[in-house]
Amino acid sequence: MSRYRDRYRMSSSKSDPKDAMVLANILRTNLYLYKPLPRETVDDARLRQLTRAHKSLVQQRVKLLNQLISQLKSYYPVALRLFSRLDHKITLAFLERFPIPEKATEASIEDLRRFFHEQGYSHQWRADSIYESLRKAGLKAPRELEEIHQTIMLSLIPVLRSLTYEIDKLASKISQEFKHNPAYEVFSSLPTGEMTAARISGELGSDGNRYPTREYIQTAAGTAPVTRRSGKTIIVFFRWQCNKHLRAALQDLARESIKRCAWASQYFAEQMGMGHRPSRAYRALANRWAAIIWRMLQTRQCFDQSRLARSHAIAC
């Protein structure tokens, strides 16, 4: 709209009546350039809101985990190497039971085994290696600051535990909504996890008529670049203006598909072989997936890797 204003005045003045006149003239002279989108279904809107809320909570958990990692590095670095993930139930329970290195060092092997048994830890055989790790010399914070780090660390754990619980509960609700979505069969056939498939379904919707061509999805997702041509000069730019949620979901699809789909793995390897950086290769694969998904929505067919291998009609 700001660009359209420049057709009617040279100064930087702005007013609501003038903007209304600009909008009216756009509809009067250039209506053919703007196609109304069909109204989305309630199921699509519900799924989109749930998946976006889930993504937001996951991002908040990552921020809290980074804060927890920062505190542990300052006074309790060995705790970062004891378990596979910091947000697991057993890890948070261990940090609450042994919040400072001294308490962990004073615990006997029997104390650790009893603690793991109480928590229902499935890898209790690791008690011996954890016991040995706790007794190795490591960096420690000054005793005057250790209490402060401990207080901050213990304040983060209840928030992390509550946030993880709500994320899991929201994921369960998303799974229920996704299975009732009209396009569930189409999107669930993609070689990716259920959450990523649900996110893509929520952003694109179940109506293929919303996107007359595959370019609509590729530009909306920001996977297709912006090309500027002037004479013999051709410059290709990264597309910034797009649906950021859809772009992130397609990027996740690209990363997960190379582990589950031979075609995607081969395509990614070809992009890397051309000298592209991993981010560029993933974006190219996501752009290809956008074209495939558009075709799936038009035909209401599930993804079939064998059919894709036989036909190369879909171009990047």
Image (tube, rainbow, N blue to C red):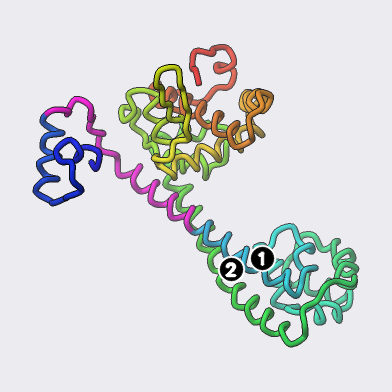
Q: Amino acid at mark 2?
A: Arg
Q: Mainly helix, strand or loop, the magenta region?
A: helix
Q: Quadrant of residue 226?
A: top left
In percent of width and height, residue 205 lies at 37, 37
Q: Quadrant of the image for the N terminus? A: top left
Label 1, label 2: how many angstroms apart (C-alpha)?
Answer: 8 Å
Q: Residues within 10 Å of mark 1 (few under 14, many from 20)?
A: some
Query: Do labels 1 and 2 touch, CB within 8 Å?
Result: yes
Q: Is residue 122 magenta?
A: no
Magenta extent: 29-56
Helix, strand or loop for disc 1: helix
Q: Residue furthest bottom?
A: 144
Residue 161 image label: 2
Q: Quadrant of residue 308?
A: top right
Q: Is residue 145 above or below residue 253?
A: below
Choose between 89 and 286: the one closer to the eye.
286
In percent of width and height, residue 12 lies at 20, 48
Residue 89 image label: 1
Q: Quadrant of residue 38?
A: top left
Q: Which residue does the image show at 80% across and 76% down from the upper left?
A: 140
Q: Which residue does the image show at 64% across and 82% down from the upper left?
A: 151
In percent of width and height, residue 154 lies at 64, 78
Q: Which residue does the image show at 79% across and 64% down from the upper left?
A: 82
Q: Amino acid at mark 1?
A: Lys
Q: Is residue 215 above or below residue 90?
A: above
Q: Is residue 276 left or right of residue 106?
A: left
Q: Earlier in the sequence, mark 1 or mark 2?
A: 1
Choose between 239 and 146: the one closer to the eye.
239
Q: Is residue 31 magenta?
A: yes
Q: Which residue does the image show at 9% across and 48% down from the upper left?
A: 17
In percent of width and height, residue 163 lies at 53, 65
